[in-house]
Amino acid sequence: MAKLIYGMNVSLDGYVDHEEFGPDATLFRHWIDHVRELTGSIYGRGMYEVMRYWDEDHPEWTDDLHEFAAAWRDLPKWVVSRSLAAVGPNATLINDDCAETVRTLKEELSGEISVSGPKLAQSLTDAGLIDEYRLYYHPVVLGGGAPFFPGPRGRLRLTAQEVIGDDVIRLTYVPA
């Protein structure tokens, strides 16, 4: 059975915004390795559209950026959306009964499946499907934006903590 993981970069005050802060070289290497090890990834429409950036090479990219793009392209993806008519390469559209489809994926696959997007993570949490939360705290205070947790959660239990790079702390929680 696969494990469903929701993890994202987050500001100290709890917001996610890929344009306001990014990973240093050590954390970026961590993300490359993480994506390589995943069984797949489930995206909400908005986050999937952001990640489509990695579908095409860009001449200014470094070797690490090319490496991440290759890992992301190889990763099986499922995209939850009622507004999209089609998705890109190596992706499957989920446009109805998201919770049941994700439940089936968890039962049929092994390894880790990542969840990307706070609203999607909220709906999968409400359905009791998220197994682990990984918060990558950056020393940035945004004062607003999309919250990592857009709604209430049951009590969580800390299972791991790790400093990654110079200033990011990853806290790992499971439902208590």
Image: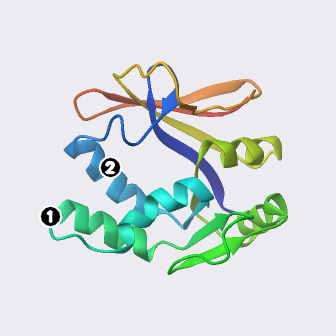
The residue depicted at 79 percent of the width and 67 percent of the height is 101
Q: Quadrant of residue 78?
A: bottom right
Kindly tell me whether residue 173 is visible in this rendering: yes
Answer with mark 2 or mark 1, whichever residue precedes in sequence: 2
Image quadrant occupied by the C terminus: top right
Q: Which residue is mark 1?
A: 60
Q: State the residue lying farthest toward the bottom.
A: 89
The count of marks equals 2
Considering only vertical position in the picture, is 126 above or below 60?
above
Calculate the distance from the C-alpha at mark 2 to the C-alpha at mark 1: 21 Å
Disc marking residue 103: none
Q: Which residue is mark 2?
A: 30
- Element at label 2: helix
Q: Badge 1: few (under 14), some or many (20 or more) residues near its Cα, within 10 Å?
A: few
The residue depicted at 27 percent of the width and 26 percent of the height is 167
Residue 131 in the image: state x and y as whole percent.
68, 45
Q: Would residue 54 be found to the left or right of residue 149 on screen?
A: left
Image quadrant occupied by the N terminus: bottom right
Q: Would residue 11 be found to the left or right of residue 145 on screen?
A: left
Circle 2/circle 1 CB separation < 8 Å:
no
Which three-letter amino acid code belongs to the residue tagged 1? Glu
In the image, 35 versus 85, the foreground residue is 85
Q: Quadrant of residue 136?
A: top left
Q: Badge 2: few (under 14), some or many (20 or more) residues near its Cα, within 10 Å?
A: some
Which three-letter amino acid code belongs to the residue tagged 2? His
Image colouring: rainbow
Residue 145 in the image: state x and y as whole percent.
53, 30
